[in-house]
Amino acid sequence: MKWGDHFQIASGSSRHETASGKPYRVTTFRNGDDLVFFPRKEKYFLFYAGKDTADRCTVEESQTLPVVSLPRYEKPAQDALS
């Protein structure tokens, strides 16, 4: 997630349902913040780490970027000691 020149790094999202069966997704960020998305209403809420109430979010801009596959890093094999 980006705003201005700042980024938040997430570890992925998980799918859940409310007690009444409404689906929602949670994206957890490394700093402890959670972004909750309700797809049926297209509503977003951000729970800042350590706070009990959420802030309502709006999508101001959206873009699709190409997927980049980075090469796998292999640690060089060490020479056997003689």
Image (tube, rainbow, N blue to C red):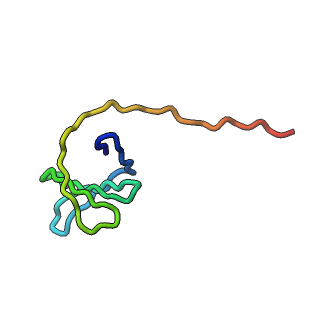
Quadrant in the picture for residue 32: bottom left
Foreground pick, 49 / 11: 49
Question: How many numbered circles are shown?
Answer: 0
In this image, 1 relative to 73: left or right?
A: left
Foreground pick, 8 / 63: 8
Q: Is residue 17 above or below residue 71?
A: below
Q: Residue at x 27, y 69 (%)?
A: 52
Residue 18 drawn at (x, y percent): 20, 65
Q: Residue at x 23, y 62 (%)?
A: 54
Foreground pick, 20 / 47: 47
Q: Residue lying at the far right in this picture: please name it.
A: 82
Quadrant in the picture for residue 2: top left
Split into 4 quadrants, where in the image is the C terminus? top right
In this image, 29 relative to 24: left or right?
A: right
Residue 27 drawn at (x, y percent): 31, 54
Split into 4 quadrants, where in the image is the N terminus? top left
Q: Residue at x 33, y 30 (%)?
A: 66
Q: Residue at x 31, y 58 (%)?
A: 34
Residue 33 drawn at (x, y percent): 33, 58
Q: Residue lying at the far left in this picture: please name it.
A: 41
Foreground pick, 29 / 4: 4
Q: Is residue 17 above or below residue 12?
A: below
Quadrant in the picture for residue 15: bottom left
